[in-house]
Image: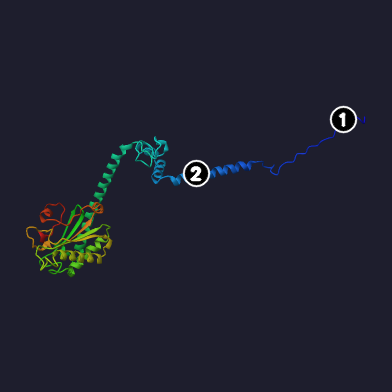
Amino acid sequence: MAGDPKKLQPIIVKKIKKGGHGHHGGAWKIAYADFVTAMMAFFLLMWLLGSTTDGDKKGIADYFNTPLKVALLHGGSGSGDASHVIKGGGTDLTRTSGQVKQGDVDAPRSTINLQAMREVVARADAQQMQALRARVEQSIANHPRLASFRSQILLDITRDGLRIQILDAQNRPMFDSGSALVKEYMRELLREIGGVLADVPNKVTLAGHTDAAPYSRGERGYSNWELSADRANASRRELLAGGMAEAQVLRVLGLASSSLLQRDDPLAPVNRRISIIVMNKEAEERYERGGDLDSGEVSLDSLTSRPGSSLPTSAR
């Protein structure tokens, strides 16, 4: 029938349009989020490394190298070991680079280790000085023109290192009387020693000595003090000409007759001498701290009783 409502109802057709990303959906968003998270973690890691002290970095590296040893001996230095909100953790407010579990127990161990290291260095220095002494003796003995000067060379080991003393002789002086001009054979001897010292990095001190004979009109003018200093400087120049580096020279002294070798005879020729000290590491450190050094003072009696000293025949 024409008036039937079922026949008049329109037919509606719904068409669904798919989006342009239907082939993969929203998976790219998840991948992008993972990338941003990874970058954030990376920059956070860079920031942490930049704000970590060198001591903490070394502690972390030591832990991963030998974790059991670090855990037993040194403890940790990270936030896991901290028991206080102040930087460094623990009860000691002076600590700023992380807490050490054993606290003051480590201090004696460090002192003992430092002392042991110093003893090792001292033994190595002593061996080096003995070897250097043997080299100086061999170098002079093997020289065709200097072997006869062996009686004028005095070698001994002091607390500061190897001391090389070149003594004057009545018939073979190192300098003319009252002069700082080096004799030709003395020049050759000093240059030979300078060549040996050029092979070692140790610092060197020089001291000039005279006998007790007063210099003419020396009280107000040129005296034994100036003469001994000039002779020490002249010897320094010959050592440098032999190959020793200028940087090795630590100090040059003129001591006049204040430190006699033969005290019972102030005018003896052996009192006129040049003293060269090749310093060991302990003496160099002591000098840098402002400590005292051996001034070259020595007596024949002390050399005779000292083990390992080499005393020339002319000085006995």
Image quarter in which the C terminus is found: bottom left
Which residue is located at x 31 percent, y 37 percent? 104
Q: Would residue 53 appear left or right of 277 to someone viewing this image?
A: right
Q: Quadrant of residue 173?
A: bottom left
Residue most extreme to the right: 1
Q: Indicate whether 312 appears above or below 37.
A: below
**Amino acid type of the residue that numbered disc 1 sits on in the rendered structure:** Lys
Q: Nearer the viewer, residue 185 or 48?
A: 48
* Mark 2: few/some/many CA within 10 Å (<14, 14-19, 20+): few
Q: Earlier in the sequence, mark 2 or mark 1?
A: 1
Q: Nearer the viewer, residue 267 or 103?
A: 103
Q: Quadrant of residue 189?
A: bottom left
Whether label 2 touches label 1, CB < 8 Å: no
Q: Is residue 42 visible?
A: yes
Q: Is residue 191 visible?
A: no
Point out residue 29 in the picture as x, y percentages from the top left corner: 62, 42
**Pointer 2 residue:** 44
**Pointer 1 residue:** 6
Q: Name the colour scheme.
A: rainbow
Q: Quadrant of residue 133?
A: bottom left
SS assignment at label 1: helix
Q: Would residue 316 appear left or right of 280 to someone viewing this image?
A: left
Which residue is located at x 24 percent, y 63 percent? 194
**Amino acid type of the residue that numbered disc 2 sits on in the rendered structure:** Leu
SS assignment at label 2: helix
Point out residue 137 in the picture as x, y percentages from the top left corner: 19, 60
Point out residue 93 in the picture as x, y percentages from the top left corner: 35, 39
